[in-house]
Image (spheres, rainbow, N blue to C red):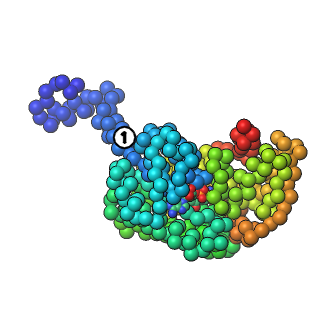
Amino acid sequence: MYSHKYTSSTDILKLILSECKRGEYPYIYATKKNKTLKKRILIIGASGQLGTDLTLQLRKKYGDHKVVATDIREDDGTLSKEGPFEVLDAMDYEAIEDVVIRYEITDVYLLAAMLSATAEKFPMRAWNLNMNSLFNVLNLAKDRKIKKVFWPSSIAVFGPTTPKQNTPQKTIMEPSTVYGISKQAGERWCEYYHHKYGVDVRSIRYPGLISYTAAPGGGTTDYAVDIYHKAVKHSKYICFLDEQTTLPMMYIDDAIRATLTIMDAPKKSIKVRSSYNLSGLSFNPIEISESIKKQIPSFEISYKPDFRQKIADSWPQSIDDTDAKNDWGWKNNTSLEEMTAIMLENLSD
Ligand code: NAD
């Protein structure tokens, strides 16, 4: 079609309309394709539990060389094998800016953080890392050096005064942990940067994430990963939470699908610019151990609650995620039984 000579803009318009009538949308298609072609992703804190799986999925979707994985730790070969990997400190604004410029980054996923259990041991370090890393990335977006930001929040934004069952999107939020306080403050800043500076920042309040690829990074829900490792290795587990402690959880594939979906959604459909509630599963240690026993009948669990019990007791048991469902079509897929089957099968290899 480009071999014809068109002398006026009316001719060009006629051409577009005729192509559209024939069911071909070359210009619309080209625009969408160009957006995808131009996308370059930076993941900060990529070597952790979420980042390892997320990096691999984003590379599958956009191409290995378009997703730059970074972490403060050297890579063990997992992320540097197929695509770019750099050591990068989330606290160092200039170093992040340098990577953004060198790789022509458009979207940043900021995953570096100190999680709930570790943060209770190092409160000031946790606050500094969790807040300064976020400001670094939000300020890059404010200055239009990047286009889009993903920053995860957590169910830890809720506290002992929050309704525990079916916790609403908007409710009392009085977190009692350093981690929760930093995530709640982060949410407020995300919303502020969106309203004040037009920053396109998107966020999810993840529940406890369960995966087999990378070890969990010091959270209160880590028991629900550890239990599968110990079941496969020793057929028994000593749980650091008591048997009735019900918490919201999610299998990693669902969490990653949610992340890709919210980042792909049209700007106007993202109505919550603090962070979205997201619900997957809710279970306690007895229920997860029963699901393991169906496959490993000799499995035994015992209980020795430690300081993490208090953190868990301050969090909700189940989450209302109506807004995520309505605004960008969220739906959880994996049940507890399915997750147990996947975890045991992969850890047995
Ligand atoms: P993780 O601890 O497993 O990984 C965090 C990564 O950040 C690590 O690889 C660590 O080396 C890196 N890191 C630490 N300090 C850094 C720095 N200064 N610069 C660069 N990298 C640094 O955590 P995760 O479970 O993968 O969590 C990722 C994000 O998701 C965090 O923001 C966390 O709060 C959030 N989240 C996780 C869960 C969960 O259950 N895993 C639940 C809710 C929210």
| Most foreground residue, 87 or 260 | 87
Residue 322 visible in this rendered orientation of the protein: no
Secondary element at tag 1? helix
Q: Amino acid at mark 1?
A: Leu
The residue beneath circle 1 is 37
Please identify the quarter of the rendering in which residue 309 is found.
bottom right
Please identify the quarter of the rendering in which residue 137 is found.
bottom left
Quarter of the render that holds ligand 1: bottom right
Measured from the top left, where is residue 40 in percent x and y?
Answer: 39, 47
The answer to whether 80 is drawn above or below residue 202 in the figure is above
Measured from the top left, where is residue 276 in percent x and y?
Answer: 55, 59
Measured from the top left, where is residue 272 in percent x and y?
Answer: 49, 61
Q: Residue furthest right?
A: 298
Q: Classify residue 71 as left or right of residue 157.
A: left
Q: Quadrant of the C terminus?
A: top right
Q: Quadrant of the N terminus?
A: top left
